[in-house]
Structure formats: C-alpha cells, structure tokens
Image: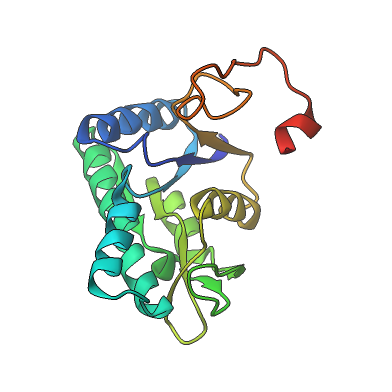
Amino acid sequence: MALIVQKYGGTSVGKPDRIKSVARRVARYVARGDQVIVVVSAMSGETNRLLGLAKEVSPAPDPRELDVLASTGEQVTIGLLSMALKDLGLKARSYTGGQVRILTDSAFTKARILSIDERNIKRDLDEGNVVVVAGFQGVDADGNITTLGRGGSDTTGVALAAALKADECQIFTDVDGVYTTDPRIVPEARRLDRITFEEMLE
C-alpha cells in the first residue's frame, strides 16, 4: 500500500464531467490498495472570475478580503469532487486549508506555508477515506484565510506530500507534454520528446 498525493489543476476539474473523470482515476488507485490525498485547484477560470468581481467592486481591494474571496473557488471543487467520489462508493472527506491547519505567514495573496498539522488527514486515511484538500490556501496564526499566490495548489500538493512522507506526489495536467513555449499563445510551439532537468526548471 502506498500513500499518494495527487494534484489536479483547474482545467482537469473545469467541468462536472472532468471532475467525475478525476474521481474515476482516484478510484483506480484506491482499488489497488493505495491511500490517496487529492489536492485540487479552483475550476478553470474561476479564480480570475472572482478577482474580476473584486476589481469591479473596489479598484484596490484589501488583500485580506481578496484572500477570503479567492479561496472560495477551491472550496467548490473539493465539495464537488468529494460528492463524485462518494457516488462511486468511496469514502471521501473534504478539507479547506484552514480545516487541515495549513499554517502560513500573514502575507495575504502570497503567503508562505510554515507548517502543516497532518493528524486529521492521517486519521481519515486510516479510516479508509480519500482526503480531498483545497490547494492554494491556508490560515495564519490569527485564523485569517490566506492564499499562496499563483501555482499555490502545486505548492500545497508538494508540502502535503512532504509533511505526510508520501510515497509519491503526482501533479496531473491536461496537456500531452512539455512544449518549447505556451502553445495557447504561440501556435508554432513544438512538443519536446526529451528535456533535461535544467531545461525543465527553466
């Protein structure tokens, strides 16, 4: 039995049918006996929509309130994915960053993770649950909701894998490989057959 952390980005959970597809993928890992923690982003476009709403209401939104708003996108996804997993007959439990107790500093909109309390997650895994965690968010020492900035869901996945000493951290995306540049911007972008570690870091 392996402990696996899987992270799914916004386009992977962008529509209800994609969320169901993620649930089926997770179910395959559970069927082979693995314990699974799933970290999810907000549905594709949702964070931008929420930030756009904030700008419509206030030209210079307060960073604390921006985090309260922006963190709701992931909360929708964890609820929907947990429902989809339960419909497949699995036990599942969702957590916001605050419910896990992903403790961060107080740098709103770009917080850094300080520590993770893994006790509740371990208990749920031991009881046979798939644990579904909202990426991109945590709470500071005063209980304020914080967000980790762009790419924060990947950070959440890797941090949870480290805190729980997971056997694997899998970061899923819906592209078929690594390209020379963003193919959505540059149509001539080429998919690379091989890439060095250093090039990937770049």
Residue 174: quadrant of the picture: top left
Taking depth in this image into account, of 110 and 38 the one nearest to the observer is 110
Could you say where residue 188 lies in the image, as x and y percent from the top left?
Answer: 54, 16
Which corner quadrant holds the C terminus? top right
The residue located at (51%, 65%) in the rendering is 119
The residue sitting at 36% across, 30% down in the picture is 27
**Residue 127: in sight, yes or no?**
no
Q: Residue furthest bottom?
A: 142
Point out residue 83 in the picture as x, y percentages from the top left corner: 21, 44
Residue at 63% across, 23% down: 180
In depth, the one of 134 and 36 nearer the eye is 134
Above or below, 169 against 96 in this view is: above
Residue shown at 55%/70% (left/top)? Answer: 111
Along the line of sight, the residue nearer the viewer: 190 or 146: 190
Residue 79 lies, in percent from the top left, at 25, 52
**Rendered position, 128 above or below 176:** below
Give the colouring mode of the picture. rainbow
Residue 202 in view in this figure: yes
Q: Is residue 157 left or right of residue 20?
A: right
Q: In the image, 70: left or right of 167?
A: left
As displayed, is residue 161 above or below residue 143? Answer: above
The answer to which quarter of the image holds residue 178 is top right
Number of labels in the image equals 0
Q: Quadrant of the N terminus?
A: top right
Q: Nearer the viewer, residue 44 or 1?
A: 44
Residue 20 lies, with reference to residue 123, above or below; the image says above
Query: Residue 186 at x, y = what percent?
Result: 51, 25
